[in-house]
Amino acid sequence: MKYYDKLIFELSCEGRCGYTLPDADWAQTSDSIPDGLKRSAAPGLPQVSEPEVVRHYTNLSDMNFGVDTGFYPLGSCTMKYNPKINEEIAGMPGFKGIHPLQPRSTVRGVMKLYGDLSSALCAITGMAGFTLNPFAGAHGELTGLMIMRRYHICRGDMKRTRVIVPDSAHGTNPASAAVCGLDVVQVNSLPDGTIDVDHLKTLLDDTVAGIMMTNPNTLGLFETRIEEIADLVHGCGGLLYYDGANMNPLLGVVRPGDMGFDIMHLNLHKTFSTPHGGGGPGAGPVGVAEHLLPYLPLPRIDGEKPDECAGRVSGFMGNFGVLMKAYAYILMLGRQNIRMAGPLATLNANYIKESLKDCYRLPIDKVCKHEFVFDGLADKSTGVTTLDVAKRLLDYGFHAPTVYFPLLFHQSIMIEPTETESRETLDAFIEVMRKIAEEAAADPDMVRSAPHNTSVRRPDETAAARHPVLKYRDLA
Ligand SMILES: *Cc1c(COP(=O)(O)O)cnc(C)c1O
C-alpha cells in the first residue's frame, strides 16, 4: 500500500499557510459593519500549505472511478464516453454567462437552440413536440404521467387511476406513478423476458390510465409484440408511456412514436452524453404525440399557456448546460453517424454475452440489444455471489456492472458495454471475468473477501445508507 492510499484528513498545523489575501481597503473602514456581525475570533479554517492541499485533493480524486478512468459497464445507466468538445461548447462564455431571469429578447440564440434541439429529438423519436424542462429521467417520468393524468381529467374520464408497469421495469417507473398519485399494477414477464400479453389483457379496463414500457426492455430484449400491445392499451382508452432513458440501441433504427407511444422521456445524460455519476447533472425531456401537445408543461418554448397544460414542473426551462451538450453531440454525430450507435452498442453487448455465457449463467439466451443480464456464476457450488464478483472486478480496475437488478433473478449482473468501447477493452473485460470465475472455483474465500487493492474495501452498505457519517470526525 502506498503511503497516500490511506488518506489523512486532519492536515492542519498551527501557523502553516498556503495563501495570503491582499490587504483589503474595507478593513480600515470596518466601522460600516455592524458590531453584531463582526467576528470575535478568527474562523477555524485548516492551516495547510499549497502542496498538501493539492496532494490531498489529487489523491482523493485518484480513489474515484469514472468513465475517463476505465471501462464502466453499468447496465441501464449507460456510462459511455462523453466527448470533451461538448464541455467546451457548453462552457462558451455566451452560453455560460446567461441568467434564467434575462428577458427573452436578450436570449434569442438560446431560444433558437431550444427549438432546434426539440426538433432534433422529435426527428429521432417520432414525437410531435418536447418540453426540455425536467431535470432527470425520474422527473421526466413524473412530468409524463402528469400529462397522462391531465389528459384523462380534461376528458372527464376520472376513473383512470391505474398505471400498468412490467415486473422488469426500472424502479423509478412505479415510484413516479406513486408520486403522481396513480396506482401501480404489475404485468408479468414471460420466461423469454418479454411482456406476458395474455396477462396484460386481464388487466385492461376503463380504470387504466396507461402503461409504462421500455423497449428494448430492462433485460435488453426487444418487445416484438409492441404493436399488438399498443392496440390493446389504446383500445381500452389508455395511453402508452415510453421510458427512453436508454435510447442508444434504437437511435436511427426504430422510433417510439412509430411504435405507438403517446408520451416518452429521454435521459440526455445517458443517451446523448453528459457525465452523470454521483447523481447528476441530468436532463429528462418529455416528448408527446400530436394530440397531447397542449398538455406540455410550463414554461413552454412557444410561450403559450393552454388550459389543458399539465402545470409547472420547474422554475425555468431545464438544465441548460446538459441540453447544450446533447445538442452538440447530436450535431457532431449527424444523421448518418447517429445511426451507428445502436448497432455498435448491440454488437458490443452480444460479443460479451457470447464470450462469457459458459462461465456465467445466462437465464435468457437470446440476441440482446444494448445490454443483457447474467444470473451470477454458472457454477453455484462455490458460494461466490454476484456481489463478490462485482467487488473482485474493482481489484482489476473495472467498474462493477449493475448488480441485483432487475429483480427477476436472484444474482442479476446487468452488463451494458455501450457503443464507445473498443474490441481490446471488451476483450480485457472478458478475460478478467473469466479469471474471476476460475478464482471462484480455486479460492472462493479470496473472491469473497475482495476487493483487496482498493482504498475502501467493503463498507457496510446498509449502515452507510441508514446512518451516514458525513463528516470526517465527530465535531461535537
Ligand atoms: C436511469 C434510468 C431512469 C432514471 O433516470 P434518472 O435520471 O436517474 O432519474 C429511468 N429509467 C431507466 C430505464 C433508466 O435507466
Image (cartoon, rainbow, N blue to C red):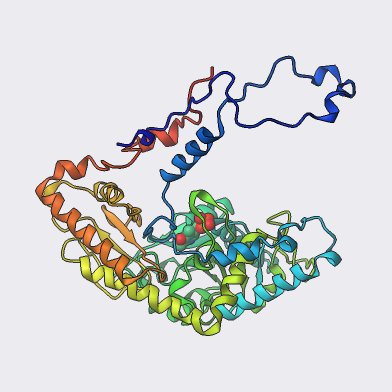
* Closer-to-camera residue (43/4): 4
User: How far across and down, in percent of the image, does residue 20 sit?
Assistant: 68, 30
* Closer-to-camera residue (77/22): 22
Residue 193 left/right relative to 260: left
Q: Quadrant of residue 137 in the image?
A: bottom right
* Closer-to-camera residue (273/88): 88
Q: Is residue 159 above or below residue 345?
A: above
Q: Is residue 10 above or below residue 137?
A: above
Q: Residue at x 42, y 69 (%)?
A: 420
Q: Residue at x 20, y 42 (%)?
A: 448
Q: Quadrant of residue 237 in the image?
A: bottom right
User: How far across and down, in percent of the image, does residue 463 sit?
Assistant: 39, 32
In this rendering, the count of numbered labels is: 0
Q: Is residue 122 above or below residue 160?
A: below
Whether residue 254 is visible: no
Residue 473 left/right relative to 221: right
Specify the quadrant that holds the C terminus: top right
User: How far across and down, in percent of the image, does residue 224 sit?
Assistant: 38, 79
Q: Quadrant of residue 1 in the image?
A: top left
Whether residue 469 is visible: yes
Farthest residue, direction top: 40
User: How far across and down, in percent of the image, does residue 227 sit?
Assistant: 45, 81
Residue 473 left/right relative to 421: right
